């Protein structure tokens, strides 16, 4: 049986990927940091082998990888996704050197596929649809650190002809998404009859449902193309925050209380945030199954059923109802 090694598996996208693997009966090993929160995996944790390892410590990573001998590696661990995560050294040590350490450990024993997770933040501010061949112009440390990891993986794929890939997710939403992000905040506040405070209605993103992202990881590790190694994962459709609100309101049974201009917008908001997904379609045969409206409907059903998880966590967040769109 294939062995799957996942980093960042307690996070949003990672936990959805881990859950899919477990439900498919796969043998899953999860590398986590000390004191990780397993709330997203609590009901399936007995079916996962947990390894408490700091990716910055190469010898320990190498020892565990040698012991496990994973066939498929999904690398999703990262620091800096949230604006509160600002430690520059920790960011580069985790996002770049952590990637290098994990890859070198896996390279030493061999593997079937290694998939790194990049970010749409690698592109920086663009005035047209984002293509994998675009010049990268990140405007923050997180984007720079993710570019470094992506370029390292690309070098290994090209120079040593290894099955090493990077997926750049665009603005992913869905089950188990973090409390303070846009769509969870909309649903959670609505379900608790609270006011929904937002910044500006015209801000844009390419929103993609998390189940589509998970599909892409699994398809890519099976296809393992030999000519392309970096892939955008979005819908190819740009939507505004106002579009999201209107689509959500269309299937709710009562009106949301929405207040615009209540939050400070993030600096450097782009006018275009849209993925070109032609490479994913033609090379891997993947494209998203869910439209924004369909994905939002599925997400709302899940949040309605699992609201209790977020109510328990609400006290952990000092800035309630502070909505940020991060990726």
Image (cartoon, rainbow, N blue to C red):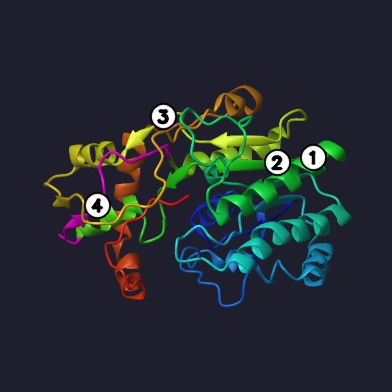
Residue 25 in view (yes/no): no
Per the image, the residue denoted by label 4 is 198
Q: Which residue is mark 3?
A: 237
The Cα–Cα distance between marks 3 and 4, rounded to whole angstroms, is: 22 Å
The first of marks 3 and 1 along the sequence is 1
Instruction: Please report the residue visible at 82 percent of the width from the left and 56 percent of the height from the top.
Output: 104
* Image spot of residue 216 (x, y percent): 58, 38
User: How many residues crowd around disc 2 within 10 Å: few (fewer than 14), some, or many (20 or more)?
Assistant: many
The answer to which of marks 3 and 4 sits earlier in the sequence is 4
**Distance Cα–Cα, label 4 vs label 1:** 42 Å
68 is within the stretch colored magenta: no
Q: Nearer the viewer, residue 109 or 230?
A: 230
- Element under disc 3: loop
- Asked whether the residues under the numbered discs 2 and 1 touch, taking CB atoms below 8 Å apart as contact, a structural biologist would say yes
At mark 4, the secondary structure is loop
Of the numbered discs 4 and 2, the one sitting upstream in the chain is 2
The numbered mark, 2 or 1, whose residue comes first in the sequence reads 1
**What is the spatial separation of the Cα atoms under label 3 and label 2, in whole angstroms?**
23 Å
Q: Does residue 267 appear left or right of residue 19 in this picture? A: left
Which badge, 4 or 1, comes first in the chain's sequence? Answer: 1
């Amino acid at each position: 049986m294939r062995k799957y090694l996942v980093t960042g598996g307690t996070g949003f996208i990672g936990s959805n990927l881990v859950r899919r693997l477990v439900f498919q009966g796969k043998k899953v090993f999860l590398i986590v940091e000390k004191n990780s929160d397993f709330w997203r995996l609590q009901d399936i944790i007995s079916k996962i082998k947990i390894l408490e390892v700091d990716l910055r410590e190469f010898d320990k990573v190498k020892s565990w990888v040698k012991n496990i001998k994973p066939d498929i590696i999904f690398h999703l661990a990262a620091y800096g996704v949230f604006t509160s995560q600002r430690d520059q050294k920790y960011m580069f040590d985790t996002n770049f050197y952590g990637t290098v350490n994990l890859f070198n450990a896996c390279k030493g024993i061999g593997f079937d596929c290694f998939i790194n997770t990049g970010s749409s933040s690698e592109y920086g501010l663009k005035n047209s649809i984002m293509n994998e061949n675009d010049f990268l112009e990140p405007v923050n440390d997180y984007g720079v650190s993710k570019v470094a990891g992506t370029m390292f993986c690309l070098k290994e794929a090209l120079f040593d002809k290894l099955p090493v890939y990077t997926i750049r997710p665009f603005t992913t939403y869905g089950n188990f998404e973090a409390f303070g992000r846009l769509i969870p905040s909309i649903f959670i506040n609505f379900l608790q009859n609270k006011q929904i405070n937002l910044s500006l209605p015209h801000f844009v993103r390419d929103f993609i449902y998390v189940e589509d992202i998970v599909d892409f990881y699994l398809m890519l590790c099976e296809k393992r193309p030999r000519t392309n190694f970096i892939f955008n994962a979005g819908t190819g459709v740009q939507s505004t925050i106002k579009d999201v609100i209107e689509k959500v309101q269309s299937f709710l049974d009562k009106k949301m209380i929405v207040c615009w201009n209540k939050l400070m917008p993030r600096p450097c908001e782009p006018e275009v945030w849209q993925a070109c997904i032609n490479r994913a379609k033609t090379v891997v045969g993947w494209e998203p199954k869910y439209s924004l409206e369909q994905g939002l409907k599925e997400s709302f059903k899940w949040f309605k059923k699992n609201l209790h998880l977020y109510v328990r966590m609400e006290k952990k967040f000092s800035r309630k109802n502070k909505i940020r769109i991060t990726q």
